[in-house]
Amino acid sequence: MKLNKKAMKLTATIAGAVALGTVATTVSANADSIYTVKSGDTLSGISCQFGHNYAFVNTLASENNIANKNLIYVGQKLVVKDDGEVTSATANEVATLPSANAGSQSQAQTDDSAAAASQAAADSLAAAQSAAAASQAAANQAAAASQAATSQQATSQATTPAATSTAASTSSNYSSNLSSSDEEAKAWIAARESSGSYTAQNGQYYGKYQLNSSYLNGDYSAANQDRVADQYVANRYGSWTAAQAFWQSHGWY
């Protein structure tokens, strides 16, 4: 039976054929080859590999008396005929025809190498993309932190002059109207309480005259400190000179 060369057929070599005296026939071995069945092979797979036609399986099984086309054995010899003729393999063919397995293994190795190269390229690309994403995230975080710091500094600089301006304005609006002796006594006490600093703090006592913070009612300006200190001394001692005398006796006022 002749078949198209594009649908090369395979035939099972019956191991006992040589022992029964099968006569060798003269065949053209120009492109014929012997395929040795490997673990995992099937007739349909071999047919598709060499003949590119699954329909050949039934014919192959029938012509070679293979009762179960799903059952072939590891080591079994199959002849790949160049001219499409289906025939039993002879001892001479088994001994002289080249192996078809070499080409199959070479193609499998080529396919495996291509798949490995493709996977390596994909892994490399994924790693590069991951590194780029991490670098961008770090850059964004650094930029956000820098922007926040700049904004906070600008806010602080904008707030400080306003507070200073308010304190100066309030201070310029207050006049204590003290006598020269009371002014001297007031300065004497301030020097010992805070060295004359409006921002000195010792626990709950704050400012130039070390007044209880609750007396200032949240207003720590120089003007309010002078005003509250004058009121405190007037109510408690009557004058700054009297407050000075008390301080000299007790170490506080």
Image: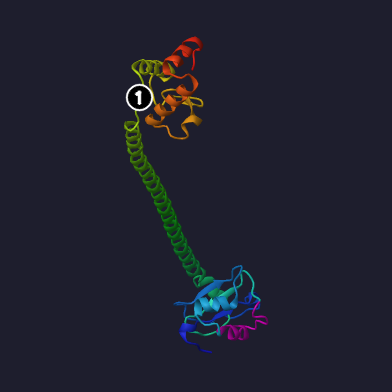
Asked whether, in this view, residue 83 is left or right of residue 222, the answer is right
- Tell me where residue 174 sits by quadrant: top left
Q: Quadrant of residue 208?
A: top left
Determine whether 130 is above or below 250 in the image: below
* Position in image of residue 6 (x %, y %): 46, 83
Between 100 and 116, which is closer to the camera in this rendering?
116
Relative image position of residue 182 (x, y in whole percent):
38, 17
Q: Is residue 78 visible?
A: yes
Could you tell me residue 221's position as x and y percent? Answer: 39, 32
Is residue 38 shown above or below 250?
Answer: below
Nearer to us in this view, 231 or 90: 231
* Residue that mark 1 sits on: 177
Q: Residue furthest top?
A: 249
Residue 148 image point, x, y percent: 39, 45
What is the three-letter code of the residue carrying label 1? Asn
Q: Tag 1, which secondary structure? A: loop
Give the vertical position of 162 relative to 174 (above or below).
Answer: below
What residue appears at the point 42 percent right and 24 percent down from the top-left corner? 230
Furthest toward the right, the residue is: 67
Residue 210 visible in the displayed image: no
Q: Which residues are magenta?
A: 56-70
Residue shown at 42%/56% (left/top)?
129
Q: Nearer the viewer, residue 4 or 244?
A: 244
> What is the tally of numbered marks visible in this picture?
1
In this picture the colour scheme is rainbow
Please give the name of the residue rendered at 64% of the width and 72% of the height, measured from the top-left corner. 73
Residue 112 covered by magenta stretch: no
The local crowd at label 1, few if under 14, some if 14 to 19, many if 20 or more residues have their Cα within 10 Å, is: few
Q: Is residue 194 above or below residue 10?
A: above
Pick the front one: 120 or 16: 120
